[in-house]
Amino acid sequence: MYKLVELEDIVRIPPRYFSKPLKEAALEVLRNNYEGKVVEGLGRVVSVLDVEISEYGYLTFNDGSLYHPAKFKALTFAAIPQEVMEGEVILVENIGIWVRLGAEEGFIHRSQVFPSREVRYDRDQGLVFDMKSKTTIRKGDIVRARVTSVSYDVHKGSLRIRMTMRQPYLGKIEQIEEQRKKELGEGNA
């Protein structure tokens, strides 16, 4: 889920930015410091959009930079446990599949791909298939999955999203539509 958040920080403006207007310099520094980084509790910062910076700053001993209090708006991406998301399958491996979810990737273990446990992986064709329902998922397919857990590793700058597709109305979008049509057809008969 994308969120627009407002944050506060003390922005360190190095001397090389002194020739620029204060707001422009602060925005550039904040973008360098935050964009692409993972902030625990917020997720990945996609973009710093705007900044309100105090024109009154301060100096510290043995540092030529100026420090200014600032409030800024940022666009972030984070998955929330139990959230249902759609994405494109970008990698199919023996252990599971990876799904592109906007700014991040989610992982679905092979045991969580299909409702049945009879799942096979075909390396040559790059697909995973369910022996019971004869359905397949391969790279490029659009799937719907539910987030089961989210973990942050701020030091490595990573956000781990674990997902499942074992419940009804989760899985490959085409298969969900077929299931829905069958159910509507049976209800009208």
Image (cartoon, rainbow, N blue to C red):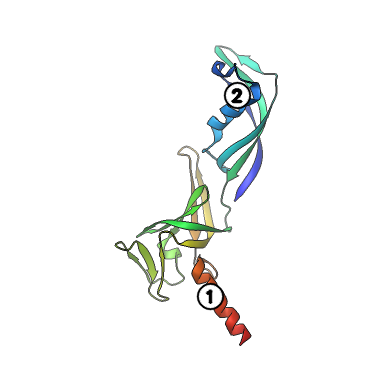
> Residue most toward the top?
62
Count numbered badges in the picture.
2
Amino acid type assigned to the residue bearing label 2 in the image: Ala
> In this figure, which residue is indicated by the disc labeled 1?
179
Q: Is residue 118 left or right of residue 115?
A: left
Who is closer to the viewer here, 113 or 182?
A: 182
Residue 56, compared with residue 105, is above or below; it is above
Residue 84, compared with residue 115, is above or below; it is above
Who is closer to the viewer here, 128 or 62?
A: 128
Quadrant of the rendered image containing residue 112: bottom left
Location of the C terminus by quadrant is bottom right
Measure the alpha-carbon separation of dots 1 and 2.
Answer: 54 Å
Who is closer to the viewer here, 166 or 179?
A: 179
Residue at left 49%, top 65%?
A: 165
> Would you say the residues marked 1 and 2 are in contact, meaning their CB atoms lie under 8 Å apart?
no
Which label's residue is closer to the chain start, 1 or 2?
Answer: 2
Residue at left 57%, top 48%?
A: 78
> In this figure, which residue is indicated by the disc labeled 2?
25
Residue 95, compared with residue 160, is above or below; it is below
Q: Position of residue 72 (x, y in %)?
A: 66, 33
Residue 54, compared with residue 147, is above or below; it is above
Q: Residues within 10 Å of mark 1 (few under 14, many from 20)?
A: some
Q: Secondary structure at mark 2?
A: helix
